Amino acid sequence: MQMQQQVQQQVQATVRPALSIESYYERFRRLNPPMFDGGADPLVAETWIREVEKMFKSLQYTEEVKVRLAIPMLKGNAEFWWTAIEAALEGEDELPTWEEFKKIFYDQYFSESIRISKENEFLSLRQTNDMTVLEYANKFTELGRFCPQMIEVERSKANRFEQGLRDKIRSRLSVLIFTSYGEALERALKVEADLKRSEKERDDPKRSRMIENHNVRPGDTEGNANKKKRFEACTYCSKPHGGPCLKKMGVCFTCGQHGHLARDCPNKKDSEPVEYGARLLH
């Protein structure tokens, strides 16, 4: 009976870890973890590690199971890479810890030189004239993770964000002291909105004057004078006018009838002048 109990204990000791890892794996798979195929983009590798670590944290997994759960997520070139690593580790009693795995992984897919390049990109980040505050903030957040020492303290993060804003916005914030990044971002967005509104108000009078100059109202004497100036000289009477030449037609400039001149027109007092372009010029 004692022998049977010892055998049962040995079987349970052998099976329990496998069942435990299987249970961990099933819970992990339900979160739909991303696969990694070892592509050429180093940021994809860094993002994969961050996403997997977020899942480990939410599931409260211990260090000893993390590597076992991450290995099945490797495919393509990354799977071949890990196969070579396993061959090099042959004879080792245990898998690397998660921190050791990350170091080996980063050496392959996210090298120190790339991390330094991203740090420098963050340190030199500036808002360009064609970049909105929100676009700048998104880029600031994206690159900020490569300089954790500069963004872990809220005041330092806010100061670095402010220094990267374009001059028109930064100059309006220079009199303020921000204690948090969120406060600096909110204020920068308000200043940007105020600048856009001011620019729009400055542009509106210009557009109004342009429209007014291009629209000639009926009866406008200046407009009519400009129209007269554009008429070409008549080939018959040598005077500029529009419409048919009344002199050539031999009609009265007042009523448009034949047989008399404008000064003898019997309808001068009762009739409106005939609407011919030449009547005011002859």
Image (cartoon, helix red, strand yellow):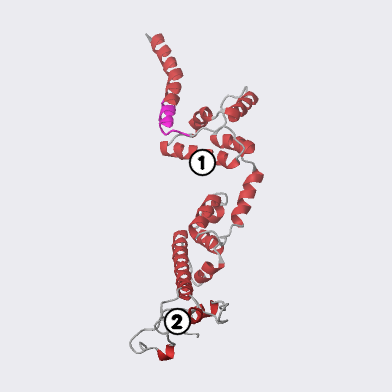
Magenta region: 23-33
Check the image and name the residue furthest to the right.
113
- Is disc 1 surrounded by few (<14), some (14 to 19) or many (20+) residues within 10 Å? few
Query: Is 254 within the magenta?
Result: no
- Left or right of residue 25, residue 267 in this image: left
Disc 1 marks which amino acid? Arg
User: What number is the disc on residue 50?
Assistant: 1
Give me the residue at 53% from left, 41% from top. Answer: 47
Answer whether labels 2 and 1 touch (C-beta < 8 Å): no
User: What number is the disc on residue 151?
Assistant: none
Reading the image, the residue beneath label 2 is 251
**Frontmost residue, 250 versus 218:** 250
Query: Which x, y percent locates residue 235?
Result: 58, 77
Judged from the image, the secondary structure of the residue bearing numbered disc 1 is: helix
**Frontmost residue, 139 versus 84:** 139
Give me the residue at 46% from left, 18% from top. Answer: 14
Query: Is 29 within the magenta?
Result: yes
Disc 2 marks which amino acid? Val
Q: Earlier in the sequence, mark 2 or mark 1?
A: 1
